[in-house]
Image: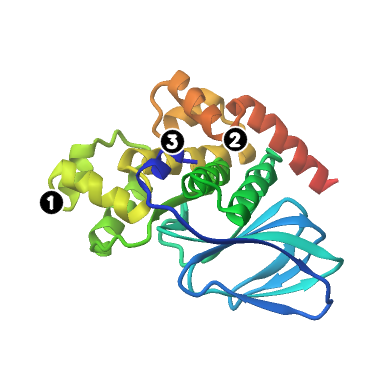
């Protein structure tokens, strides 16, 4: 979601190839010391890691952070574009402390393949300026991935003390409904404000205020789907003391107003019940 993070990142493309899986026997992919991404062009199947399993389908992105082992079994012929990156790690934008290393997103825009096809042509022919063009194309792909409200990125070589930042994250999750300021958050761990902002973003990929907004919006989504409280009451409860700012922030993340979100999720819940 926080696409501005890309501007300061040092994304480097190491390899990009189009591959196909013609056997029904399971195959194993290792991400080793780089981020590995698979864009599914065709087909579908099952995947399994040490901690999770599930299914994938056409136009899915399978994202593996470094050090992952992924086993894939096709249900029908599978084709994908595989590329490896360094300079960034993908992390959950809400559960920053999560140890999850595999993410699956869907290409709702249906534009990713066009970017990747251009990157494949550039990489195969090594035209003048290829390195710059492929970098920009891959940055476009990452930007589309980050439009998912569930993911963000961070610099893969950042080393900071985690305990203090985790204290602030816990403090935010426990006090998100209150009026919280940067000065208050920084003083919670006795850190100077501007240094705190920099360290927090290095650790989480988000600014402290962006993280606070994400926590508030996640709680608002639950209340919209599961309660009968008015939108203005929910806004106030989760810490948005301006209903208009709440609606604006909510729409930026969810591409719909709070009322539209409630209507959509109420319908889906009724379908599951019936």
Dot 2 falls on a residue whose secondary structure is helix
* Residue drawn 84% across the image and 77% down it: 24
Which of 38 and 154 lies nearest the eye of the viewer?
Answer: 38
Q: Assign a secondary structure to mark 3.
A: loop
Q: Are marks 2 and 3 in contact (CB under 8 Å)?
A: no
Residue 175 or 32: which is nearer the viewer?
32
Q: Which mark is residue 190?
A: 1
- 83 over 47 or under it: above or below: above
Q: Is residue 72 left or right of residue 238?
A: right
Work out whether mark 2 precedes mark 1 in sequence or the reverse, and give the earlier one: 1
Residue at the spot x=35%, y=44% of the render?
Answer: 8
Between 189 and 54, the one nearer to me in the picture: 54
239 versus 248 height, above or below: below
Q: Position of residue 155 (x, y in %)?
A: 36, 55
Residue occupying the far front of the picture: 128
Sequence-earlier tag: 2 or 3: 2
């Amino acid at each position: 979601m926080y696409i501005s993070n890309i501007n300061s990142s040092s994304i480097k493309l190491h390899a990009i190839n189009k591959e196909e899986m013609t056997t029904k026997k399971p195959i194993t992919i290792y991400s080793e010391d780089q981020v590995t991404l698979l864009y599914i062009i065709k087909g579908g199947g099952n995947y399994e890691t040490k901690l999770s399993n599930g299914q994938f389908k056409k136009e899915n992105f399978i994202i593996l952070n470094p050090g992952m082992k992924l086993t894939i079994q096709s249900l029908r012929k599978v084709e994908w574009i595989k590329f490896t990156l360094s300079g960034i790690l993908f992390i959950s934008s809400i559960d920053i402390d999560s140890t999850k290393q595999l993410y699956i997103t869907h290409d709702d825009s249906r534009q990713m393949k066009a970017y990747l096809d251009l990157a494949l042509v550039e990489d195969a022919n090594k035209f003048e300026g290829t390195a710059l063009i492929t970098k920009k194309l891959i940055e476009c792909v990452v930007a589309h991935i980050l439009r998912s409200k569930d993911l963000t990125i961070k610099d893969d070589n950042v080393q900071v003390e985690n305990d203090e930042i985790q204290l602030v994250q816990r403090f935010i999750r426990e006090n998100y409904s209150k009026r919280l300021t940067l000065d208050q958050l920084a003083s919670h761990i006795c850190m100077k404000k501007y240094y705190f902002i920099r360290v927090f973003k290095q650790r989480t990929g988000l600014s402290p205020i962006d993280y606070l907004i994400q926590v508030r919006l996640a709680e608002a989504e639950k209340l919209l789907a599961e309660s009968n409280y008015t939108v203005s009451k929910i806004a106030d409860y989760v810490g948005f003391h301006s209903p208009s700012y709440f609606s604006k922030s909510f729409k930026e993340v969810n591409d719909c107003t709070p009322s539209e979100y409630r209507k959509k999720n109420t319908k889906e819940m009724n379908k599951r019940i019936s």
